[in-house]
Image: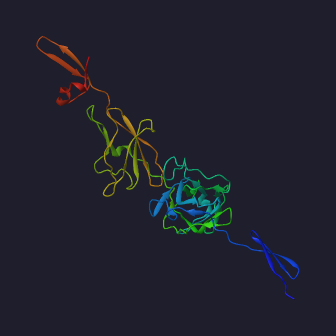
Amino acid sequence: MKKNIRIFSFGVSALLISAGFLVAVSLVQAADSTIQEAGSAPSEMLSSSEVFAKANAVVATTTFLLRQNLGSATLNSVTVVITDPSTGLVNTDIASVSLRKESGATSNFQVAEDLVVPGAGASAITPTIGTPITLTPTPEAIGANIVQYYIVITIAASPANGHSLAVNLGTNYGIDSIGGTVGTALTATKKITIDTVVPSDPSAANYILSQNAPGTADLIMVKTGESAGIAGNTIRIYASNGTTLLGSGLLGGSPNAQFDAISIGNNTNASVKVEFADPAGNTSAQVEVTGNDIVNPTAIATAYTDRIIIQFSEQIDGMMAMNCANYTIG
């Protein structure tokens, strides 16, 4: 006697009738993600092979682009690995690692604009070193337009000086709402090195203020033979209030760390404040440099029948005296 076998398909399961018995058979299939990387593979954001970061610094290490491809899956998690390129890194050196998204206000990563994506799990506090860290934001709806994401490290408030870190992405770093995966692996070749050493304070005696006639900007410069600071640091010149930036310059190399003369305005700043900043963003105290004369000379004229005598409020040379724009007759 022949037995009839019939299969009735119902979505992802089937009913198998054999010899009078009803048997349920599960047909399980792996889901393909409808989210895809857009354009290039993930890339590193660091500007050089080693970038220095101070305490509490916020640094974007990695970026990747995603878009929806004929579907509606949401991005549910992203997995990263923080590695130690040298030795000594501990999780307390890092305040957090987080997933951020480009706001569109200004291109490339901006700390104040490109905020952490919604969801408490989008950031990991004092993250582990060397093992996968899964960031789980509120499911991210991604449309057909490209979305740029950033992996961002925040350095701890009291990290160890000299410790380094890098951030890797594994293959299929992203998981979507239907169980699909997306992502090309990225092994970092660049690193962040923590720098907590503040530059030494400037010495006011090392600088001179070059005074010029009204109409020509006054300058600040380093005295001949003196060193301004450490090569590679930046010197910043502020007005006497300590907040209005007048100019800045990169300190050069041997024999002395010098910089090109910096304008301090046209007869407007009697004194300026000087500070150093290192590549990590650590800054020295501000030091005041004084002595720029910004008061125009005045003159008193006494007329006689055969001559006029002009008395100036300060000693000036003959060429200056002939330039009437440089003094006022009272």
Q: Nearer the viewer, residue 220 or 61?
A: 61
Residue that lies at the very extreme toward the front in this rendered image: 1
Q: What x and y, as percent, mark residue 186?
A: 53, 68
Residue that lies at the very extreme toward the top in this rendered image: 305
Q: Tell me if 310 is positioned left or right of 152 in this view.
A: left
Quarter of the N terminus within the rendering: bottom right
Q: What x and y, as percent, mark residue 60?
A: 53, 57
- Placement of 219 over or under 69, stated as above or below: above
Q: What x and y, as percent, mark residue 229?
A: 38, 52
Q: How is the image coloured?
A: rainbow
Quarter of the C terminus within the rendering: top left
Q: Nearer the viewer, residue 323 or 22?
A: 22
Residue that lies at the very extreme toward the left in this rendered image: 306
Q: Residue at x 22, y 20 (%)?
A: 311
Q: Tell me if 189 is positioned left or right of 315 in this view.
A: right
Q: What x and y, as percent, mark residue 150?
A: 55, 57
Q: Tell me if 227 is positioned left or right of 29 in this view.
A: left
- Placement of 261 over or under 302, stated as above or below: below
Q: Nearer the viewer, residue 158 or 315?
A: 158
Q: Residue at x 35, y 32 (%)?
A: 268
Residue that lies at the very extreme toward the bottom in this rendered image: 1
Q: How many marks?
A: 0
The answer to which quarter of the image holds residue 320 is: top left
